[in-house]
Image: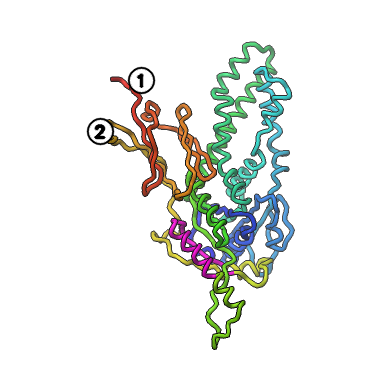
Amino acid sequence: MICDDEYGRVLLFTGKGGVGKTTVAAATAAHLAARGRKVLVVSTDPAHSLADALATRLGPEVSEVDCDAVSGLWAAQLDPRALVDRSWHRLRTHLGTVLAGAGVDELAAEELTALPGVEELLALTEVHRLAGAGPWDLVVVDCGPTAETLRLLALPEAFAGYLERLFPTHRRVVRGLLAGLAGSSAVRRWDDTADALGRLADHLAALRAWLTDPATTRVRLVCTPERVVAAETRRTLTALALHGIRVDGLIANRVVPDFTDPPGGMGGPAHDWLRARRAEQDAVLAELRAAGVPDVRVVEHLAAEPVGVPALVALAGRVHRVTAPADGSGGAAAPAPPRVSRGADAAGAPEYLLHLALPLAGDDDLDLARVDDELVVTVAGGRRLVALPPVLRRCVVTGAELDQTGLVVRFRPDPALWMG
């Protein structure tokens, strides 16, 4: 079965474009609804193929899917552009006011407030709102292709950093600028702007906590058993772990059926090709399992395209697990938070070690940089700013290495910042 395990409140599906991600997400939702669960399936994918998979009309507003075979299934296709028009205009105006008051001309203010990623951020915000706004037991999210999804999931942290750098002490700065202004309307306008920025910062923090809570939100990857796709899947695992987001497992779609030898050995070229193709796919799946991909499941390639709720429910019944999770949890453990330990270098001098739990592949490109009180970690196409604890802020980075837990960054106390 496709969903025998108890998931969190929200389950996000992503994968390389063209691997059948939308179909698998819709099949998961239909399967759970057929088992008596109340399920909402939402698409944030600009391709808008969820309606095609369910064989029904969908819009940005949630509606119940009309199907005699299944009840308790709701669906929606979010329209990020409409979300921008509805939600972003007011804050954009406030930011333009702040920038203009700080001496930035109108054109530059317009450019700075047209922040990249706003549509994706508001789509994520809408999913967060919907997750707590209805009777559903589970929200299944059909995300965009992998690269778009990684950008989507990293946005709350990225936007929070952007705001902190643009307005590091916005309440104090904004009120300081009031000294040069006259009139109560100006005071109210600046105060409204400060309040809006504060609410946005709080909202970004809430989104970040929601995404990284393994009891609430998990990600399931969809792939086809091909080496190029598998390589991207491994990089995605690393990038998600970098942001502390739990991957619940992987579904390998369109696996060639495992044909047995025909009677009398009358296989022929077609049979030989299918056997060779299945052997190649099995080798890719074995590599993924050996790389630590959690809870791998497969769905065989069907002769007919699964369209409509009954066909999706049938597809879900054909998914089976090919390896049992070692801990019986039905997925990978949540990524461990960064931790610090104390040790000594080869010369016996004291040093500190920062441990980052990352499932790194041998060919991953890893880059580290120190920016003030943060460590910039770039790996597998993803980047994260890791806030250094106070003890490491007075240290310098001396090196990094990989061990069985992930990445270990070495720090040496900076004599200029430590008491002798």
- Given residues 335 and 309, the one toward you in this image is 335
In the current view of this chain or complex, which residue is farthest to the left?
A: 348
Q: Type of residue at label 2?
A: Gly
| Tag 1 residue | 416
| Tag 2 residue | 348
**Could you tell me which secondary element the residue under label 2 belongs to?**
loop
Q: Nearer the viewer, mark 1 or mark 2?
A: 2
- Given residues 128 and 353, the one toward you in this image is 353
User: Residue 17 location, x and y as percent?
Assistant: 63, 55
Quadrant in the picture for the C terminus = top left
Residue 162 occupies which quadrant of the picture? Answer: top right
Residue 85 occupies which quadrant of the picture? Answer: top right
Residue 306 versus residue 363 in the image, above or below: below
Q: Residues within 10 Å of mark 1 (few under 14, many from 20)?
A: few
Q: Type of residue at label 1?
A: Ala
- Given residues 142 and 4, the one toward you in this image is 142
**Could you tell me which secondary element the residue under label 1 belongs to?**
loop
On screen, residue 158 versus residue 362, left or right, reads right
- Name the residue rendered at 58%, 64% in the picture: 253
How many numbered badges does the structure rendering display? 2
User: Residue 161 location, x and y as percent?
Assistant: 54, 32
Label for residue 119? none
Q: Is residue 243 visible?
A: no
User: Residue 76 location, x and y as percent?
Assistant: 68, 53
User: In the image, is residue 151 part of the stretch drawn in magenta?
Assistant: no
User: Residue 136 location, x and y as percent?
Assistant: 59, 55
Q: Are marks 1 and 2 in contact (CB under 8 Å)?
A: no
Q: Mark 1 or mark 2, which has the lower sequence index?
A: 2
Q: Is residue 12 visible?
A: yes
Residue 257 versus residue 208 in the image, above or below: below
Report the magenta residues as a range: 278-300
On screen, residue 18 versus residue 286, left or right, reads right
